[in-house]
Image (cartoon, helix red, strand yellow):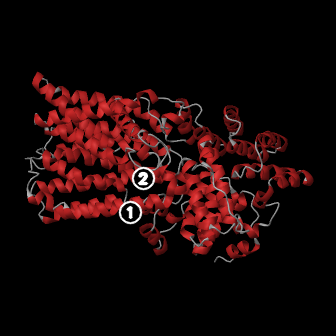
Amino acid sequence: MTTLYGMKKYEWIALALGLWIIGRLVLGSALGGQLLNYDDERYIASNAVIDTLDSDHMRQMFTGFFDGHYHPLTLLSLAIDKAVFEDDITGHHRVSLGLHLLNSVLLLLLLLKMGLDRWVSVGVALVWMLHPMQPESFVWMTERKNVLYAFFFGLSAYSYLHHLQGKGGRWAIWAAYGFALLSLLSKAQAVVLLPLWFLLDHALGRSLKARQTWVEKLPLALIFVGFVAVTAQAQTVQWGASMHAGPGGLERPMLALYAFVLYFLKGLIPFGLSAYYPYPSDCGGNGAGWVWMGIPFLLGYGYVLYRLYVMGRRTTVFGLAFFLLNLLPVLKFGSIPFGEYLMADRYAYIPLAGLWLAVFAELQSLLSRMGRGSLLAYIAGALGLVMAIAVQPRIDTWSRSEALWSEVLERCPDYFHARNMRALARVADGRNAEAAADWTASLETDPLRTEARLNLAILYAKTAQPAEALRVLNEGIHLLNPLDSAPETARLYNTAAALYARGGQAQRALSLLDSLGPQRADSALYRSLSGARGVIEHSSKEEIPVLSEVDREQASRREKASVLSGRATELAKAGRFPEAKRLFAEALKLDSTNARIWLNSGTNKAQSGDLEGALRDFERCVATDPQLGIGYLMLGMALKDKGAKGAACAAFVQAQSLGVALPPDVRSYCSSRP
């Protein structure tokens, strides 16, 4: 007796259960992963939005943006995790791994429902589940959105197939609409479901000229257009002008095509995988000589697709087109997705299913012509074994922050961001000497890396080595002009002054602060923190000269960002908030890693009445530099004004733990909590 998928009931259940068991055994080490210092703090550890499941938090999830996204179901799933497992990170990992295994089983059933050979279906699902590019999606907690949207994505595709096969009546198409909406509410990348439905039409031989084929897609098309607009708005609100940072002109599309080549090659043969893929220009030119290959590769890919279409190889065409369509939204032809990286393994999460479907479809065709079709099961098993072995190091990499950033440094030894993040991870693990070595290495490469200098000095100060801290700071002071308007320069001088004051050398501290000129107002030694809201203070409305084009061309990106920020600060002091906002946006476009620019931009917005904009900038400030106490203080002030008392007081506590003296009104505000 047969049931679903042309098999006896116990057969397809056995295949699905076997796939789940293999995945749980091979991927189970993911449950031991830690929270990473790569967005996990913002999404989970310090995310006030997921603290509780009350109506206020639910309203925040469904009516606001978070980290440049509109994905309320992702936030809701994390909030449920927190409610069920409290602060047990293993619970979060169980849910993410469980979703990945469910997605693997769903992929198997989807392929069987398409009428494909059982070993083609098993092989694709097995390789997809164990592929070494996948751990980024289910081990990294921040990427809950990936496994969650994929789950609803698969259910929508399955429901649509059910509809195409004339089963389920009208509920099938409405279920497909509903699951598509849930997928979009988890991650906007689900917009590719619309072209996927057309691909399924073609794969099952449905006419694309039929009126009904197009009419039934209209509700989905309207939903998707709305979500594209919402996503663009979310990223614009979060990142503003800075989202256009990175390569410009023809270089951007060239790099996007090059990334497509890498996704294809790494998808077939998982070599040279990394937790982070900087642009070639940020990695010593690594790979720059191959960027040109994107254009001929895409032309060849298109030609192969056309020839396969003419030959009637529907399954292979479906797989290759599926791979391409799912990658198109994340190839950086434009400014979405935001981020200063070439590619990311997580973006291949769903596309890999199409690539390997094409591979297994062609293997089946070849073996059938040779009369060796039974070999496909053995090939599927062998490929699964290879992937099972290769995936273990990737799970280890995504389980600990230090391993993650160490891997990036193996590819790009001079990439400052990775070295800085590894040093912070080592500090968190209590490995201070190794952290100091990382920051020292950064300074040897570039003595003007003020962020590294400050972090190293703070580490020495916190480990009772004030003399070493002052040595590091004074070396920087000799290299920098105190009047260059760079926020990091002012912070370096202020930190040195604080150490001198703590050591009883008040005169030396005052001398350093005096050399800063107007920027000394940013020092807690010069003013009380009860006036912290005035990080940018009003002053005379004198004309502020703008940078000349010559200056713009001669300065580096970081230097230009610092200068622009300084000019913006002066404009804000003069009460010219809209002009200051524009310059801060330009500065952040050039350097989005400068926490002080985010801080001052947020203060400018707060003073001009843009509380939501200020809150976003302060959140980005503390995410960029978790050691910047004044950032947490300003974040708390903004949250206090918004009425989010619990989150505000949590920010104030963090500020105090970083050495910021809380104003009396703040202390009384938080002490009055029930």
Kind of residue sitting beneath label 1: Val
Callout 2 environment at 10 Å: few (<14), some (14 to 19), or many (20+)?
many
Indicate the secondary structure of the residue bearing disc 2.
helix
Left or right: 582 as drawn, with respect to 486: left
Instruction: Tell me which residue sits at (77%, 43%) in the image.
Output: 460
Q: Which mark is residue 144?
A: 2
Instruction: Tell me which residue sits at (70%, 45%) in the image.
Output: 455
Callout 1 environment at 10 Å: few (<14), some (14 to 19), or many (20+)?
some
Does residue 393 sit above or below 350 in this rendering?
above
Residue nearest the observer in this picture, 573 or 663: 573
Image quadrant holding the C terminus, namely bottom right
- Which one is in front in this view, the residue at disc 2 or the one at disc 1? 1
Image coords of residue 566 (percent x, y): 68, 55
Q: Which residue is mark 1?
A: 230
Given the current orientation, which residue lies at the most extreme top position? 370
The picture quadrant where one finds residue 309 is top left
**Discs 2, 1 touching: Cβ within 8 Å:** no
Q: Which mark is residue 578?
A: none
Left or right: 673 as drawn, with respect to 196: right
The picture quadrant where one finds residue 216 is bottom left
Residue nearest the observer in this picture, 664 or 427: 664
Image coords of residue 290 (percent x, y): 41, 28
Image coords of residue 195 (percent x, y): 23, 51
Left or right: 89 as drawn, with respect to 321: right
Does residue 293 sit above or below 13 in this rendering?
above
